[in-house]
Image (cartoon, grey):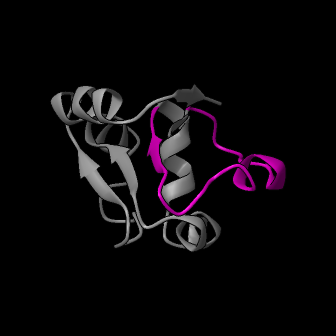
Amino acid sequence: MLHIVNQSVVTASQIALIRASDAVLLIEDGVYCGVATACETLLQRTQNCYALLPDVAARGLSQKMHEGIQLISYADFVDLSLAHSPVISW
């Protein structure tokens, strides 16, 4: 399953849906969840955490992202979407 997060706040009930085999992609304002001090809970659920590089760069967060978050391109976004089913946006 691919969880696409586009909001800057993730609730405990949303995080509870994430399984170890799932992937999480942070886009738009969701990239704020990848800042080093904010994403520990996500990384405890799955090590498959990604952030869309253009969104990270647009918000000036490139140097603030947690080292466990992989920065990816739009092409990688498409590949993740094709590799995971279902895809859930929240």
x%, y% of residue 59? 41, 41
Is 16 in front, or is 7?
A: 16
**Predominant SS along the magenta part:** loop
Determine the image quadrant of residue 61. Answer: bottom left
x%, y% of residue 31? 48, 45
Q: The C terminus appears in which quarter of the rendering?
A: top right
Name above or below for residue 9 compared with residue 64.
Answer: above
Name above or below for residue 41 compared with residue 23.
Answer: below
Q: Residues in magenta?
A: 6-27
Q: Is residue 11 left or right of residue 26?
A: right
Is 82 in front, or is 68?
A: 82
x%, y% of residue 2? 47, 38
Determine the image quadrant of residue 75. Answer: top left
Q: Residue furthest right?
A: 13
Identified at 29% across, 27% down, the residue is 82
Q: Is residue 33 left or right of residue 52?
A: right
Q: Is residue 70 left or right of residue 7?
A: left
Identified at 71% across, 54% down, the residue is 15
Identified at 59% across, 66% down, the residue is 45
Q: Is residue 60 magenta?
A: no
Count of numbered labels shown in the rendering: 0
Identified at 49% across, 51% down, the residue is 22
x%, y% of residue 21? 47, 57
